Image (spheres, grey):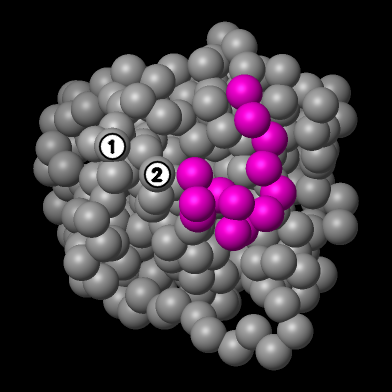
């Protein structure tokens, strides 16, 4: 396994396999890897010849007073996990190389980036789209894998890739959950023991809404109300949003069907957690 910090070096290696007809699969991350990331890497290993992992805590997707400085990091552990998953190259660029002095170009995806986390975190998806576009230009992947826990992020990247005719297949992978149902997230490391218990309200809300949907309820206002009520019973939880959206366009929907997204963002103590489910799909 190679560890590369230089953009020029990474681009040179990326171009060489392409000339030989070898497929590059790519998993971009901000590090502090967990089993969710490992599932992407294992799938990536089956889909190509050269598996590249990037680790880069992207400053331009963090807003003012967000958790950039305290975002969890453990590079040694990340590299061990990457090696165990069969990664060929770990690309770890510096902020100075990714955004040198005078950097002034950004990528904006409009409509699909506006609701949900886009409304709560203005500019966040501009930062995501910009860094992913840069990484695609550096790594030159044939296939890139992203987790469905960050559902809107995946939608934004799919839209950007299609709109800009980027020759990259985007693969969304299922949410990986802890044994008690809490979605795996690097930010779970922030939670105290009592907060970790409180975080169960997200999956409990999802299960409540899914149960109602399975029983025939189709009114999104009812599904939202019932899911929100579960969260509001938890004193440590503060709701950012609970919304039902069309799973493809992220437009608001009055009636749920087999492709409707239920998306949640909840603050537990000082930690903002997100989760989602698509009605009609397995949890």
Label 1: how many Cα within 10 Å (few below 14, some 14–19, many 20+): few
Q: Residue 48 is drawn in which quadrant?
A: top left
Q: Which residue is drawn at 81% across and 39% down?
A: 73
Secondary element type, mark 2: helix
At x 78%, y 23%, the residue is 77
**Apparent side of residue 193 relative to residue 87 in the rendered image (left or right):** right
Q: Identify the residue under disc 1.
A: 20
Q: Which residue is drawn at 75% across and 84% down?
A: 101
Kindly state the secondary structure of the residue where label 1 is placed. loop
Q: Distance between the residues labelled 2 and 1?
A: 7 Å
Residue 25 position in % (x across, y down): 38, 35
Q: In this view, does 198 lie above or below 121?
A: above
Is the C terminus in the top left, top right, bottom left or bottom right quadrant?
A: top left
Could you say where residue 15 lies in the image, as x and y percent from the top left? 39, 50
Q: In which quarter of the image is the N terminus?
A: top right
Which residue occupies the foreground of this view, 267 or 50?
A: 50
Determine the image quadrant of residue 94. bottom right
Q: Give the range drawn in magenta.
A: 1-13
Q: What mark, if any, has residue 251 been given in the picture?
A: none
Report whether residue 274 is seen: no
Please indicate whether residue 83 sits to the left or right of residue 59 in the image: left
Residue at the spot x=18%, y=30% of the render?
280
Q: Mark 2 points at which residue?
A: 16
Is 219 part of what is drawn in magenta? no
The answer to whether the residues at label 2 and label 1 have Cβ atoms under 8 Å apart is yes
Q: Foreground: 103 or 235? A: 103
Q: Is residue 28 visible?
A: yes
């Amino acid at each position: 396994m190679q560890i590369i910090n230089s953009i020029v070096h990474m681009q040179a290696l990326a171009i060489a396999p392409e000339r030989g007809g070898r497929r590059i699969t790519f998993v971009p991350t901000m590090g502090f890897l967990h089993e969710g990331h490992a599932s992407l890497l294992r799938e990536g290993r089956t889909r190509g010849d050269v598996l590249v992992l990037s680790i880069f805590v992207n400053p331009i997707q963090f807003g003012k007073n967000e958790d950039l400085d305290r975002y969890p990091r453990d590079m040694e552990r990340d590299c061990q996990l990457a090696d165990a998953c069969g990664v060929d190259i770990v690309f770890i660029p510096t902020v100075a190389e990714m955004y040198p002095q005078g950097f002034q170009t950004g990528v904006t995806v409009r409509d699909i980036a506006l609701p949900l986390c886009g409304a709560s975190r203005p500019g966040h998806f501009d930062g995501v789209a910009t860094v992913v576009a840069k990484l695609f230009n550096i790594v030159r992947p044939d296939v890139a894998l992203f987790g469905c826990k960050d559902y809107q992020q995946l939608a934004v990247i799919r839209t950007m890739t299609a709109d800009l005719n980027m020759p990259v297949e985007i693969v969304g992978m299922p949410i990986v959950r802890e044994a008690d149902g809490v979605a795996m997230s690097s930010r779970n490391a922030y939670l105290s023991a009592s907060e970790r218990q409180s975080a169960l309200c997200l999956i409990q809300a999802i299960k409540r809404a899914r149960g109602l949907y399975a029983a025939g309820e189709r009114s999104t206002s009812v599904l939202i109300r019932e899911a929100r009520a579960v969260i509001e019973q938890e004193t440590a939880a503060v709701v950012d949003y609970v919304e039902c959206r069309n799973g493809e366009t992220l437009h608001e929907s009055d009636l749920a069907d087999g492709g409707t997204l239920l998306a949640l963002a909840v603050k537990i103590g000082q930690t903002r957690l997100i989760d989602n489910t698509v009605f009609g799909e397995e949890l």
